[in-house]
Image (tube, rainbow, N blue to C red):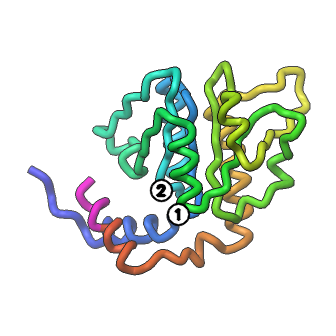
């Protein structure tokens, strides 16, 4: 039998929901390792991303366990696409700028990019990185500066590094304090989360 939710729990839900960054999206492209997928969801929850977009054209869509209370995927919406153009059109209809992470001569350092705008950040497959299609459809490309012999990070680690630079910039701009979510929208999220 399920116990009724406490006022303290409701207040925490409201506080967390109010800090969600609705102008920030994470896009996962063909990431196949379930441990990486889970780690990315946890990081997204930690920085306040309300929705993850999945584009899977080669790998199968990952199975997400929502049973555990520590599972971040139950606090984040997921939308799925199998077509690059459909996904990009959807993001563009919501006015997202698409920024993909990759090693490319046109890529900009994450420390030189303004992440306080309405942005969707794309991270790619563990071995292949982002696809050529995604590269062509991106508005900008970014990379993480590295000074070691090995010029790559695990995708979940790379995602965390990027998103914490995003968080740092948004904290400095007080975007977590001055989140402009409508009260009615906030209450919808609170009611939804109360049932989880």
Give residue 50's mark: 2
Q: Residues within 10 Å of mark 1 (few under 14, many from 20)?
A: some
Query: Which label's residue is closer to the chain start, 2 or 1?
Result: 1
Q: Give the magenta range.
A: 191-196
Residue beneath disc 1? 22
Q: Are marks 2 and 1 in contact (CB under 8 Å)?
A: yes
Image label count: 2
Main secondary-structure element of the magenta-colored stretch: helix
Q: Is residue 36 left or right of residue 12?
A: right
Q: Is mark 2 on a helix, strand or loop?
A: loop
Residue at screen point 67% across, 58% down = 167
Q: Is residue 152 left or right of residue 105?
A: left
In this orientation, does residue 21 appear?
Answer: no
Residue at screen point 49% across, 46% down = 52
Up the image or down, 164 lies above or below 6; here it is: above
Q: Which of 133 and 156 is in front in this view?
A: 133
């Amino acid at each position: 039998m399920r116990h009724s939710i406490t006022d303290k729990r409701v207040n925490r839900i409201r506080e967390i929901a109010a800090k969600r960054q609705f102008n920030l999206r994470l896009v996962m492209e063909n990431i196949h390792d379930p441990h990486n997928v889970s780690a990315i969801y946890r990081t997204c929850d930690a920085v306040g991303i309300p929705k993850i977009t999945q584009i899977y054209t080669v790998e199968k869509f990952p199975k997400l366990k929502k049973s555990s209370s520590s599972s971040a995927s139950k606090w984040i919406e997921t939308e799925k696409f199998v077509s690059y153009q459909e996904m990009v059109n959807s993001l563009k209809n919501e006015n997202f700028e698409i920024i993909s992470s990759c090693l490319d001569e046109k890529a900009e350092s994450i420390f030189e990019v303004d992440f306080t705008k309405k942005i969707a950040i794309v991270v790619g497959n563990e071995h292949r990185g982002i696809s050529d299609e995604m590269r062509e459809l991106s508005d900008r490309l970014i990379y993480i500066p590295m000074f070691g012999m090995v010029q790559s990070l695990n995708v979940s680690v790379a995602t965390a590094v990027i998103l914490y630079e995003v968080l740092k910039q948004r904290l400095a701009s007080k975007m977590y304090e001055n989140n402009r979510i409508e009260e009615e929208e906030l209450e919808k999220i609170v009611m939804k989360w109360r049932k989880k």
